[in-house]
Image (cartoon, rainbow, N blue to C red):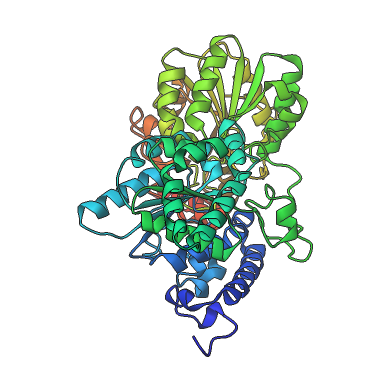
Amino acid sequence: MDDFIIPDLHNMKLPKDLKKLDKDQCDLLCSQIRQILVDTVSKTGGHLASNLGCVELTLAIHRVFDSPKDKIIWDVGHQSYTHKLLTGRLDRFDTLRQEGGLSGFCRPDESPHDAFISGHSSNSVSAGLGIATAMKLKGSKRYTVVVLGDGAMTGGLVYEGLNNAGKSETNLIIILNHNEMSISKNVGSIAKYLSTLRTKQSYHKTKDVVEKTLDKTPLVGKGLIKAIRSSKKAVKNVMLGSTMFEDLGFKFVGPLDGHNIEELENGLKAAKRLRQPVIVHVNTIKGKGYAPAEKNPGEYHGIGSFEVATGNPDVVLPDSFSSVMGEELVKIGENDESICAVTAAMKYGTGLQMFAKRFPERFFDVGIAEEHAVTFCGGLASQGMKPVFAVYSSFLQRGYDELIHDLAICNTHAVICVDRAGIVGDDGETHQGLFDISFLSDMPNTTIYSPASYSELRLCLNEAVNAEYGIRVVRYPRGRNSSCYDLGPACTTYSHIKNGGRILAVSYGRISDNLFKAEEQLNNSGIVFDILKLVKVFPLDQKIVDIFNSYDAVLFFEESYRYGSISEKYAAICSNVVPYAINGFIKQGNVADLLDKCGLSAEKIAERIKEIANG
């Protein structure tokens, strides 16, 4: 590119033009990319710190490998923004996480350069091994490249994949991006182990210098190198110690400086030449290049819009369902020493930081390991403790077997606080909390509460904690309480508002507010209907069945996946119940707009009621 002095993403054929850049041009391009990341995420919100930390790494990957012929898989995918920019999506990057725009994660239906779907942690090694094996079976010599954050190394699925991948004889290259963070600071023995590797670069640098020097020494140089290499394992075990990855069958390259393009490319090229499963250990700084994100990478992991100059978010919510839960759990913990709080790498996201500060000995962050968290709670409960596991709805899906086997069968008492229940908006399909009702309400010995306000949340949490047995689930939405209707003292069962109608509208959680708004909208039309607002939604209640049977029609509106929903379960008992729930996956967008599209806004609820009333 003789006429290409200062690189500009807007004027490049990507990703192939990346291979034509020299080191200085690469450095300039990285600076440009970081500016685009900060400017865009400041407007759209998104995952900033993780993306700033892997700019050079992403550029190096695309310069060494040939996507999409070589398959690149991003674990979680929240560090894939630079990958999107380098694979032809610059012109749409301002639509990131917006309705109809680019996903905040990797989607194969968005680009052929996205080899596998991402959104949840720790699946990349298994998926990568499957892809690499398929390519090998088809006679392809192309490479499969997995980018795995060290936070994902706290998830058990990684080790199931590594156990099989090391001896697979495939062209699988796993890049371990080590920044000592997932969303919060990494915890556990694996984090400590990786940190010891981080400090051992001196061995590799010394080895490289010695080999290069001997290589230039006539006559004796080649022989000495051969002798050194033949005894490399013994020498390495003295100086460095064998890594767990090599014990699993991988070749090991690194640690490499994740912000040095030349070092990264040399390491990746070395991995390619080996043509067998390789771990490339890369050290990066989360938030690199933007001071506020470097200073506080946890806060800038996932963030709303913010002011670029100061790094200050536009809006800081003074309260939320998550923080109210956290505050109430602290109050409960003051009077009950058996209360334990458990999180899967989501201390701040779930509001448990307050409990962690007040009762550190009773707070447990198990890392990105929801399966372990559930069974760990079962063990705590078996010895008389009262575990409270706070977890996002979409992440609890990974603990399904453990919920049944390790809690429900023995009727063990544990509390599951399901955060981000319902539609969450801009993170899209992989994060919408639409399935917890369906899979939790199929479990015996399970009680589910879905409070619509802070007062109901506090009451439900206390009742759940003080129960004698069984799984007690308290589920609530992301963000603030927006309820406008005070029904008097909070309760944990249901509220039945009788207006003299022959139609009953039913809901629970935050969208129950929309029933009252619909009522106001229909007042001038002379349409009268009654309202039933559930708080305890499962098990099914015979009193509720009796109420349903007293109406001509029951319209049940539910912010949940339809199949397996509470409305469907009541419809199987009461022939007059009509379920209105969500059918299928929901892409990213504004929560209010998505609820409207799903027929759950006040306006759409009013339309459905009007249709039934006018028969």
Q: Name the residue furthest bottom.
A: 3
> Nearest the camera: 396 or 501?
396
Q: Quadrant of residue 305?
A: bottom right
Q: In the rendered image, is residue 275 in sight?
A: yes
> Nearest the camera: 336 or 253?
253
- Count of numbered circles in the view: 0
Is 552 on the left-hand or right-hand side of 201? left
Q: Quadrant of residue 144?
A: bottom left
Question: Residue 524 location, x and y as percent?
Answer: 58, 53
In this rendering, the answer to whether 32 lies above or below 528 is below
In this rendering, the answer to whether 402 lies above or below 392 is above
Question: Residue 227 location, x and y as percent?
Answer: 43, 47
Q: Residue at x 46, y 51 (%)?
A: 224
Is 448 on the left-hand or right-hand side of 572? right
In this rendering, the answer to whether 471 lies above or below 53 is above
Q: In the rendered image, is residue 314 in sight?
A: no
Question: Residue 559 location, x and y as percent?
Answer: 49, 43
> Nearest the camera: 20 or 321?
20
Q: Name the residue furthest right.
A: 310
Q: Residue at x 62, y 48 (%)?
A: 202
> Nearest the camera: 377 or 579?
377
Q: Name the residue furthest front.
A: 219
Q: Residue at x 41, y 34 (%)?
A: 438
Q: Residue at x 52, y 73 (%)?
A: 90
Question: Residue 33 location, x and y as percent?
Answer: 60, 70
